[in-house]
Image (cartoon, rainbow, N blue to C red):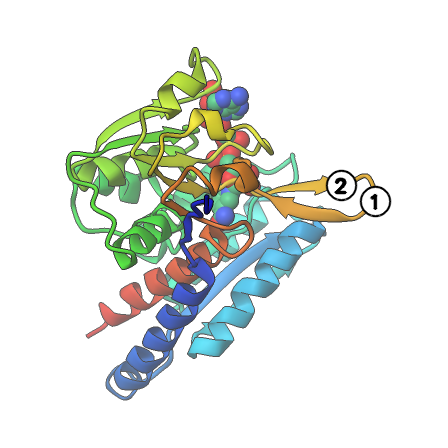
Amino acid sequence: METKTAKLLDGKSLAAKIQQELCAAITKLQPQIGRPPGLAVLMVGDDPASAAYVRGKENACKKVGIASFGKHFPVETTQAELESVIAALNHDERVDGILVQLPLPSHLDAVTLLHQIDPDKDADGLHPINLGRLVRQEPGLRSCTPYGIMRLLREYEIPLQGKQAVVVGRSILVGKPMALMLLEADATVTIAHKSSHDLGAITKNADILITAVGRPGLVTAEMVKTGAVVVDVGMNRVTDADGNSRLVGDVNFDSIKSVAEFLTPVPGGVGPMTVAMLLQNTVNSYSKEL
Ligand code: NAP
């Protein structure tokens, strides 16, 4: 008997398509606005993973025609210095989006910095004003990772209305805004976290299962309903017995692909969509200039 295999939710291809669309939109808007859109990515310190993410974001900006106003600060930079940089960027008319790359060194208070960003330039969609707009179902800049997941589900015409959706993880970055977006799309939403009892019984009930935890192999095939849509946000670096390291998600991809109907790969699923939505948010702010 032939084994069934889940269809891949290909975030990499969709992100490339979105980038092309944004590039075309910018080409059209630029003569009217008189400048390209601008994004400032602020990074503090030398964390190699953060540096790689920042490079990825800046390369993506370049591809679509967004000007980068990124700044890389030494690890000893103070809170006051960063606050004054953010204040200047808030008033800089060439800049439509500002984001602070996390994590920050421990002497800095990320939440306070985030609150200083003009909510209309909050490219990451994490400012309390934008989270509040999401709660109230008002237009605003949306958190990039869940926004990207919603876009991916829409592309594959996955119905959400009336479906049982389970989000594992309740961070401000992913889990909570994800749950709110699914609720906005009329799904029936359950959020699981560390204190949830019998995670498998909860996830097994999901038509749409989103995992945003950061634990490799947390979700196995027995925990997934046949025909479910599984979106794996987790990004975990693991080292194999031969010493090679690779990136894996929170779900056991190989076993779940014969149970799920749709499944995101890691890498190539949610990650590229997050970057695409960062660009989208920047262009959304830019187009408000008209
Ligand atoms: P986080 O802030 O550490 O939150 C993790 C969440 O998982 C918490 O709510 C925690 O519950 C929950 N959790 C931990 N262990 C659990 C368990 N055994 N059972 C159920 N829930 C459990 O992480 P995050 O920032 O949301 O990121 C989650 C993962 O997504 C990470 O791997 C991160 O690298 C990845 N990520 C990927 C992208 C992308 O673009 N692909 C973007 C953002 C994040 P409590 O609240 O009870 O502690």
Q: How many marks?
A: 2
Residue 227 x, y percent position in the rendering: 33, 38
Res. 243 mark: 1
Question: Is residue 104 shown to the viewer in this render?
Answer: no
Q: Which residue corresponds to the image point at 25% horizontal and 71% vertical from the top-left?
A: 287
- Percent of width and height locating residue 189: 26, 28
Quick check: marks 2 and 1 in contact, CB under 8 Å? yes
Q: Is residue 232 left or right of residue 79?
A: left
Q: Amino acid at mark 2?
A: Thr
- The residue tagged 2 is 239
**Where 152 sits versus 39, above or below?**
above
Give the CA separation, mark 2 to mark 1. Answer: 6 Å
Regarding residue 32, the answer to whether it shows in the image is yes
User: Front-most of 12 and 93?
Assistant: 12
Image location (x, y in percent) of residue 99: 47, 54
Apparent side of residue 161 relative to residue 100 in the rendered image (left or right): left
Camera-side residue of 150 and 198 = 198
Residue at (23%, 41%) from the top-left corner? Answer: 134
Q: Is mark 2 within 8 Å of ligand 1?
A: no
Which image quadrant for residue 162? Answer: top left
